[in-house]
Structure formats: C-alpha cells, structure tokens
Image (cartoon, rainbow, N blue to C red):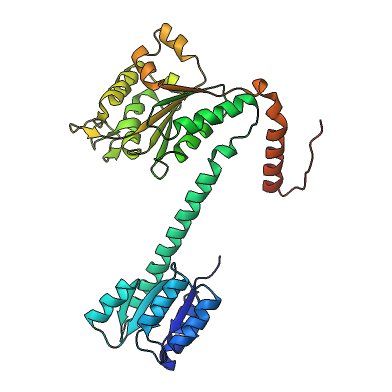
Amino acid sequence: MQKDKILVADDEQSMREFLEIMFKKEGYQVSLASNGEEVLKLAEKEIFDLVLLDIRMPRLDGISALKKIKALSPETIVIMITAYASADTAIKAMKEGAYDYITKPFKVDEIKLIIKNALEKKNLQRENILLKQVVRDRYHFDNIIGQSSKMIALYDLLEKVAPTKTNILITGESGTGKELVAKAIHYNSPRKDKPFVTLNCGAIPEPLIESELFGHMKGAFTDAIATKKGLFELADEGTIFLDEISELPLLMQVKLLRVLQDREFKRVGGTDDIRVDVRIMSATNRDLEEAVREKRFREDLFYRLNVIQIKIPPLREKREDIPLLTTQFLKKYSEELNKNVSVISP
C-alpha cells in the first residue's frame, strides 16, 4: 500500500525535524520545506496528500503558498500551523481552502489525530470516486456483449427507458443476464448515485419476506430484537430489483400492489406510514401471463409491474454473438488465472 505523502513547511528547523521524525514513525512519507518558495518548488514537482503549512514563513507567507498549492493540486489537504493565532487568519485560511488550523504549542496526540482523520477522509473520497467509476464502467451498455440484430434492438430500448421513472419487467431464461440489464438501466439513469437494492423473491422464506421488504419494529415478532429498515426504505430515491418475482406469495403480492399504488407502507409492527420514491424493476424466467391465467399471480400487480417489458434473447437466438462472448470470457479468465491463452478451438 502506497504511503501518504506529507510536506512539512516551517521556518523553524527544530520543528521541521521533530515533525519529520514523528510522521515517519506513523508510516508517512515526509518532505520538508523551510520557506514558501521551497514549498512551491516541491509542490510543482509532485502531488502531496497533505501539506502542514506554517502561516509565517520567509520569502512567501503561508496564505499565499496555500492559494498556489490549491491552484496546483486542489485535492491536496492543507493544514495551517502557527504560533500567532487569531480569528482573522483562521477564517482567511479556511476561505482559501485550508482543511484545518492548528496553533502552537500543540499536543502531539492532537496533531496525529487531525492528520490521520484528514487523510482517512481524503482516501475514502478517492475510493468512493473510484468505486463509482468502476460501477459506471462495469454497467455501461457497452459491457452487455453482443452485436446481433436482437442485441442492437435491446440497446436501443435500454437507452430509451433508462432516463424514465417507469417500472420495468425484465423477462428471459436463466443465465441471460437479467440483473446485469437492470443494473445497466439504473446506472445510466438519473438515479445512478442512489441505491440499487436487490431481493431474490424465491430465496427468502415466506414469513420473512414482508420484514425484508418493509422492515419491522423492535418486538414485532420473536426475533425482532431491534427496529430494522426494509429494502424499500433503503432504496429510497433509487431502484429496487425484485428477481424471480413470480415466486412472490399471493399475500405479499397484495401488499406490494399497495406500495405501488400509494408509494407508502408500514413496517411490520409499526403504525406510521413511510413514503418512498423508488423505481421498481422486476425479473422472471417464468411466463407471468400464464401465472395470471392460473390465478397464481395477481393480474392488477402484473400490469403495474409490466409497464415496459424487456425480453432478453437466449443465446440460441443470437448465435452470431458467440465469438464475441467467447473472446470476452477468454480475456477475462486468462487475466484472472494469469494464463496466456489466446485462442479457443472451433
């Protein structure tokens, strides 16, 4: 793991040396500067995660150096340090982008904690940006593989429905990529920065489904040792994906229909109505219309879920995509297994 880079800028040699020893013991990579000009020379050569900057320095004062550091590297955290504390200089430093303000003399544990918290916050923000980028890249329409006429028609439909709020029913045989399509729609929609929550309706025991979807209050049943939010509440302003919707018991179908109609529900054991703004995508590998005819699935719920239906073709209907898929899987597993496999036999 790469060490965080800290630049210590102070005109007192003893202070620089003391902070260098302390930060190196904490595992940081440390550079030193004795005046504002040295700070800028170093900042122009490399990007620091954090700069500890004395306000009063020769050649270029700390506030001026702060402005130039922020212009060079906006993501660098700058913490001001001085023996001449005043409200005016603190406010001015904060306005120019300083993260915090420390006065001399300071406690060693205090400065360690401030540095640690600042860097942890920065690293979390960086990880969050990278994670969002990975999610966007992974679930972009380009990552649904296929160039057959049926797949091109599917891409066109996904681009049309992604920006809407409409409920979507995704149908297709097992293994055709229904959840991948649902995620692609969500992460290319205005809700992309909000939660994408999934529930496999066939994997949860019937007595627990209501609690899973709508949450419960403490004491609502034997094992309810604490109040718990349900998936609908967790998905507020985002998307909930109900896989294997055909497996939802009839009683829960009634309760789900009520949520679709009113956009509100009560937790199990609760009395307060909870309002949510959730887009619902559901998926099935069964014939839901047949289930409606056989009274195994409510007709009114079917029409609420099936506002737009996206049917994913099975591989046998898009055989021309097999070479593309083969190449993709070959590349993926060669990298994962560190094998130099370049071709698959006919």
Residue 193 drawn at (x, y percent): 40, 45
Nearest the viewer among 117 and 203 is 117
Q: Residue furthest right?
A: 345
Q: Is residue 41 visible?
A: yes
Q: How many marks?
A: 0
The picture quadrant where one finds residue 124 is bottom left
Seen at 26% across and 75% down, the residue is: 91
- Picture coordinates of residue 190, whole percent (x, y): 40, 40
| Quarter holding residue 53 | bottom left
Measuring from the top left, give residue 87's x and y in whole percent.
Answer: 22, 79
Please name whichever residue, 126 or 230, is drawn nearer the observer in this view of the structure: 126
Q: Is 280 drawn above or below residue 17 in the view shown?
A: above
Q: Residue at x 49, y 14 (%)?
A: 287
Quadrant in the rendering for residue 77? bottom left
Q: Is residue 178 visible?
A: no
Left or right: residue 340 compared with residue 7 = right
Query: Is the C terminus in the top left, top right, bottom left or bottom right quadrant?
Result: top right
Side of 209 where 184 appears, left or right: right
In the depicted view, which residue is nearer to us: 197 or 225? 197
- Residue 197 image point, x, y percent: 41, 37
Q: Residue at x 27, y 81 (%)?
A: 89
Q: Quadrant of the N terminus?
A: bottom right
Q: In the rendered view, tell whether residue 38 sits above or below residue 243.
A: below
The residue positioned farthest toward the left in the image shown: 271
